[in-house]
Image (spheres, coloured by chain):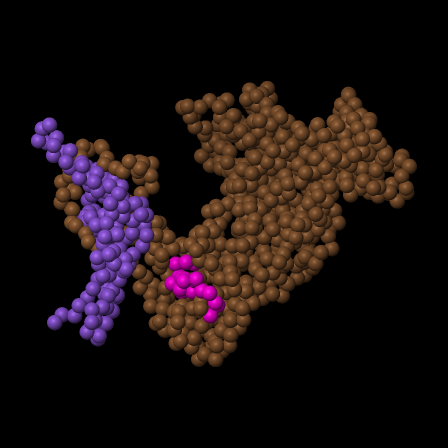
């Protein structure tokens, strides 16, 4: 290759180019130029080195390893795996390990080829390496299974998980069995090795732990949980691993960011991510618990109970990490069944039956029992099919939302709300058609002077929409996205949505009772009549339970509304006055998710301000009202707490796990904690009211409160429930 | 046309003649970049497309080659490490040396080592 030095000529020539102009290829655009990496800039140039720094990692894989060093390496890998499982890329976590790098690159064609030093006979007899290799293979295979589970579900890249593999295959072509077999061999090797017994046990424990983890993931991939014995065994091994972690001796340079230069040449190495060893143990224990507990949702024998179960997991604190959430999500579609129980269509019909369509000929599953030979039967079936096709997907999505990360839950609800609003409009049309075809007679709903039709389908949609609406606001409060001075308004809005929902539930009840009467007076066979009556009772049970829950929510929200109004009147929370905004614009932004809803229509900013601030009532009157409300709220939640998480009988699946002393299932515990939290929040609201009443004319207290009043954050003392933000007052 | 204007026109036509040709640019830290010349400006900042980065062999590799040369008595090679880096901009301040590569086709037929595309450091034993 012949080259000519043109340095000086080039520089001289470039010097006379008018500053600001470019000499460039006509095909080359400035737009492209923006994408060029700047050489010498450590942020862009991946080859940029510190003075005297070597571009390659310095670790010698042939050097012998002490048993204590092996132990340290294993614990470090467990550590980096945690970092990966919480969302960091492999390049900054596991792929910084020189050992893992060599196992996976160049891509091994056989399992035997996957070694630290390729084509080296001495390797096969190197004991420490054989043991570490077994550990690494188990680890990488586990990662592969985790990745498959997560990517098969709905997840957010880089928010939940980073899936970039840099062309590494993660051993996916080799079976878990062959890798587990290799681990058994390594355990034998370990026994024959002359290691100090304590260290030897510790190493064996780590390999067994990895085997257990891999086996658990294999079970999960098949939709099965592991049995309680292996579950407990895993926790025990973890405790053992944790207690022996201090034996480890650091291996210098075994992890290096320099490996990243080979993963991607255009991205400079980014720092390694590790977590503290304490976090490692906590994370693993938590993840194992979450994975095992999540199977308890299979106990739910009904769509409503399944929703409660999903909700309880979504709002558990801390929220399960991405893998358990993906596992929970996988149950929705496992073997094309929802929660291993029903096909999506039957699942949807089950929900309809227990809300607005008990003993109804409209549902495919009860048509043969209640089918009435009316005119336009096929037309009705066609419309009904249209409804099912439209709604099935959206209905399952509601469950899926609860498996997303906390921030996405609210955002997805905001979108879902608009979708459900549109569906409601379409369903009203289908309802009208069915109503005219089936010659439905109107009846007089409570609190109404005009007879009305049942609108069963759109009514069902409206019920779910209002639930989503309420959850959107509550999740907003949970995540503390509202400024303190906005809380009065948001609690008012929450209470008002609950109020609308309560009215709607009453309306639904009315039509179910109507149906019940009609069935009882009908000339169906006795057993069909009994079945119909049972279905109506199920629907009423469900509606009552929903009513009780929403009523309780409504009461706390109303009490907190007044508390925050009073705090606003006394200017306890400072309000910054932004220069370029006004109340109307701020209202528009805040209410954006609800702005375009056809029903319930969003009130005007003036009306909202009027209803929120209640200027017409004096503070004394308001506080008396708040005292009444918080007392009723406490009673209402106590009533709710007497019930169980499930409304319907549990599925007799083998999944229901009971505690060692025959305690309630995981979901029972979660439910009880949840409702008790609401009771406590109501009590706290009551105490708040008492404090405010006492301070009515106490200016000194108000001054003090301005400095000391605060809103307890998640996990703080005084935050009795995530959904209830009771201010902590002096 | 004044003298300076003529000079300027000549300079620009020289730079333009280089567009689309392969340049070898050595930078302060010793790395060499080869790529197709796309753009430059008054400060000699250069944009190269389809670039490769070449780095002198590491001390260890060099040492190994020296040992090998000593043992065998024949010249030994320590290959420079190369990576594809794509579209890059080399700031004028970084540039130590710029070379123009003669048509690769031509070079391939005349040099014996043309089949080896990676530049190598050849170490000969002294004496």
Q: Which residue is drawn at 16% across and 70% down?
A: B125
Magenta residue span: A94-112
Residue at left offset 70%, top offset 58%:
A654
The residue lying at 46 percent from left, 22 percent from top is A582
Q: Residue at x 51, y 74 (%)?
A: A185
User: Residue B104, relative to residue A408: is it above or below?
Assistant: below
Q: Say which chain is brown.
A: A
Q: Nearer the viewer, residue A199 or A165?
A: A165
Question: Can you say whether A612 is above or below B63 in the image?
Answer: above
**Residue A545 spot, x, y in % from top left:** 72, 40
- Looking at the image, residue A576 sits to the left or right of residue A715; the answer is left
Residue A184 in view, yes or no: yes
Left or right: residue A393 compared with residue A485: right
Q: In the visual, does A95 lie left or right of A176?
A: left
Which chain is purple in the picture? B
User: Residue B98 at x, y = what percent?
Assistant: 19, 48
Q: Residue A466 in the image: x percent, y percent?
A: 65, 33
Residue A667, can we see it? Answer: no
In the rendered picture of this protein, how many numbered marks are placed on residues? 0
Q: Quadrant of the N terminus of chain A?
A: bottom left
Q: Which of A219 and A335 is in front in this view?
A: A335
Residue A100 part of the magenta segment: yes
């Amino acid at each position: 290759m012949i080259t000519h030095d043109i340095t000086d000529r080039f520089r001289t020539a470039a010097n006379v180019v008018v500053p600001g102009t470019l000499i460039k290829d006509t095909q080359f655009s400035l737009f492209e130029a923006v994408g060029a990496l700047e050489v010498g800039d450590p942020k862009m140039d991946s080859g940029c080195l510190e003075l005297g720094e070597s571009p390659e990692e310095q670790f010698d894989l042939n050097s012998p390893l002490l048993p204590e060093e092996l132990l340290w390496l294993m614990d470090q890998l467990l550590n980096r795996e945690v970092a990966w499982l919480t969302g960091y890329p492999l390049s900054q976590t596991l792929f910084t390990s020189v050992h893992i790098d060599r196992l996976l690159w160049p891509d091994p064609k056989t399992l035997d080829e996957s070694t630290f030093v390729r084509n080296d006979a001495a390797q096969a007899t190197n004991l420490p390496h054989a043991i570490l290799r077994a550990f690494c293979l188990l680890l990488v295979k586990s990662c592969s299974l985790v990745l498959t589970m997560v990517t098969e579900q709905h997840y957010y890249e880089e928010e939940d998980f980073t899936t970039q593999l840099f062309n590494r295959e993660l051993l996916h072509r080799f079976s878990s069995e062959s890798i587990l077999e290799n681990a058994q061999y390594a355990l034998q090797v370990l026994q024959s090795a002359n290691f100090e017994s304590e260290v030897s046990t510790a190493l064996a424990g780590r390999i067994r732990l990895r085997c257990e983890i891999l086996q658990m993931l294999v079970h999960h991939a098949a939709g099965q949980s592991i049995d309680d014995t292996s579950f407990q065994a895993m926790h025990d091994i973890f405790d053992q691993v944790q207690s022996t972690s201090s034996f480890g001796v650091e291996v210098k340079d075994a992890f290096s960011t320099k490996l990243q230069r080979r993963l991607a040449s255009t991205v400079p190495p980014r720092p390694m991510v590790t977590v503290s060893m304490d976090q490692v143990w906590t994370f693993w224990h938590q993840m194992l618990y979450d994975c095992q507990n999540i199977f308890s949702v299979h106990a739910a024998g009904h769509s409503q109970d399944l929703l409660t179960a999903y909700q309880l997991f979504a709002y558990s604190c801390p929220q399960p990490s991405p893998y358990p959430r993906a596992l929970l999500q996988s149950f929705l579609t496992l073997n094309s069944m929802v929660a291993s129980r029903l096909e999506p269509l039957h699942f949807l019909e089950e929900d309809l039956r227990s809300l607005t369509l008990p003993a109804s000929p409209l549902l495919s599953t009860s048509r043969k029992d209640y089918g009435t030979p009316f005119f336009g039967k096929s037309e009705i079936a066609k419309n009904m099919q249209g409804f099912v096709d439209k709604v099935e997907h959206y209905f399952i999505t509601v469950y899926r939302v609860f498996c997303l990360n906390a921030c996405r839950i609210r955002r997805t609800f905001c979108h879902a709300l608009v979708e459900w609003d549109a569906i409601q409009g379409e369903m009203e049309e289908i309802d009208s058609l069915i109503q005219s075809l089936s010659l439905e007679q109107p009846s007089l709903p409570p609190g109404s002077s005009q007879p009305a039709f049942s609108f069963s389908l759109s009514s069902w949609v409206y019920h779910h929409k209002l639930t989503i609406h309420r959850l959107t606001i509550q999740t907003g409060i949970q995540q503390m996205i509202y400024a303190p001075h906005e809380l009065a308004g948001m609690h008012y809005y929450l209470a008002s949505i609950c109020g609308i929902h309560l009215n709607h539930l009453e309306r639904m009840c009315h039509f179910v009772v109507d149906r019940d009467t009609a069935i009882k007076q009908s000339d169906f066979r006795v057993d069909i009549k009994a079945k119909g009556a049972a279905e109506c009772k199920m629907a009423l049970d469900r509606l009552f339970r929903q009513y009780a829950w929403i009523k309780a929510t409504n009461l706390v929200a109303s009490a907190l509304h007044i508390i925050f109004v009073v705090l606003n009147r006394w200017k306890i929370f400072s309000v910054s006055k932004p220069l370029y905004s006004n109340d109307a614009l701020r209202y528009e932004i805040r209410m954006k998710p609800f702005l375009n809803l056809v029903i319930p229509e969003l009130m005007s900013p003036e009306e909202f301000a009027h209803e929120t601030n209640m200027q017409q009532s004096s503070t004394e009157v308001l506080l008396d009202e708040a005292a009444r409300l918080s007392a009723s709220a406490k009673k209402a939640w106590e009533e709710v707490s007497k019930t169980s998480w499930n409304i319907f009988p549990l599925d007799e699946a083998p999944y229901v796990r009971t505690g060692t002393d025959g305690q309630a299932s995981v979901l029972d515990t979660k439910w009880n904690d949840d409702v008790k939290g609401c009771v406590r929040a109501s009590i706290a609201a009551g105490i708040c009211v008492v404090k405010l009443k006492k301070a009515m004319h106490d200016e000194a207290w108000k001054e003090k409160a301005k400095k000391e009043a605060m809103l307890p954050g998640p996990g703080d003392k005084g935050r009795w429930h995530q959904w209830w933000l009771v201010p902590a007052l002096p | 046309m004044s003298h300076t204007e003529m000079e300027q026109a000549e300079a620009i036509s020289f730079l333009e003649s280089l567009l689309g040709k392969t340049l070898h640019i050595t930078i302060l830290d010793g790395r060499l970049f080869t790529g197709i010349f796309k753009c430059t400006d008054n400060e000699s900042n250069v944009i190269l497309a389809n670039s490769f980065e070449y780095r002198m062999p590491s001390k260890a590799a060099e040492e190994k080659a020296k040992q090998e040369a000593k043992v065998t008595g024949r010249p030994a090679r320590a290959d420079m490490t190369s990576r594809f880096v794509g579209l890059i901009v080399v700031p004028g301040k970084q540039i130590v040396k710029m070379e123009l590569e003669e048509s690769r086709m031509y070079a391939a037929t005349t040099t014996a080592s043309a089949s080896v595309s990676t530049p190598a450091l050849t170490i000969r034993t002294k004496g």
